[in-house]
C-alpha cells in the first residue's frame, strides 16, 4: 500500500494564514518565545506549545484589553517550529508531529 503524499508543511493554507498573522502581531511571538525560555530556565526539558500559547493569549488580553484579538489554534505548530529554528540548542523542547519541517 502506497502512502498518500502529504503537502509540504510550509506551503499549506494554514501556514499562509500564520505567516500573515505572525507579521501583523509580533507581540505574540515575543510572548511565546519569552514564556518558552522561562520554562527552559525553570528546568523543563519539554513543554506544551499549546500551554505556552494559552499563556500568551491571557497575557496579551490583559496588556491590551482588546476583546476582539484572537489567536488561531492552527498557529501553534508554526510557533513551535519557529522556536526550534531560532533556538536550535532547544530544538527538542517542543515535540512536533513532523520533525523534518
Image (spheres, grey):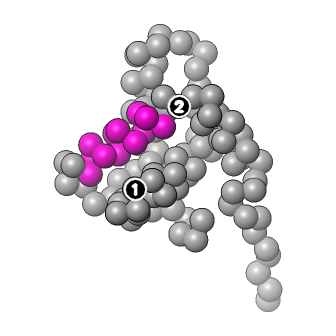
Point out residue 87 in the picture as x, y percentages from the top left corner: 40, 56
To which quarter of the image does residue 94 belong?
A: bottom left
Where residue 93 sits in the image (x, y, percent)? 37, 59
Q: Is residue 24 left or right of residue 53?
A: right
Residue bearing the label numbered 1: 87
Along the viewing direction, whichever of 5 and 29 lies nearer the viewer = 29
Q: Quadrant of residue 63?
A: top left
- Number of marks: 2
- Residue 54 in the image, given as x and y percentages of width and height: 44, 35
Residue at point 71%, 40% (across, down): 17
Write down the residue under mark 2: 26
What residue is rendered at 28% in x and 60% in y? 45
Q: Residues within 10 Å of mark 2 (few under 14, many from 20)?
A: few
Q: Is residue 64 magenta?
A: no
Secondary structure beneath dot 2 equals helix
Q: Up-down: is 23 above or below 83?
A: above
Q: Quadrant of residue 60?
A: top left
Tell me: 42 left or right of 34.
left
Q: Position of residue 42 (x, y in %)?
A: 19, 48
Q: Main secondary structure of the magenta part?
A: helix
Q: What is the span of residues highlighted in magenta in the rendered image?
A: 29-40
Whether residue 54 can be seen here: no
Amino acid at each position: 500500500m502506497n502512502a498518500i503524499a502529504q503537502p509540504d508543511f510550509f506551503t499549506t493554507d494554514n501556514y499562509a494564514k500564520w505567516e500573515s498573522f505572525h507579521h501583523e502581531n509580533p507581540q505574540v511571538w515575543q510572548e511565546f518565545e519569552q514564556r518558552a525560555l522561562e520554562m527552559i530556565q525553570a528546568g523543563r526539558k519539554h513543554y506544551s506549545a499549546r500551554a505556552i500559547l494559552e499563556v500568551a493569549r491571557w497575557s496579551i488580553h490583559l496588556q491590551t484589553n482588546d476583546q476582539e484579538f484572537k489567536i488561531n489554534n492552527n498557529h501553534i505548530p508554526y510557533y513551535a517550529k519557529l522556536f526550534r529554528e531560532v533556538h536550535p540548542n532547544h530544538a527538542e523542547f517542543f515535540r512536533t508531529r513532523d520533525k523534518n519541517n
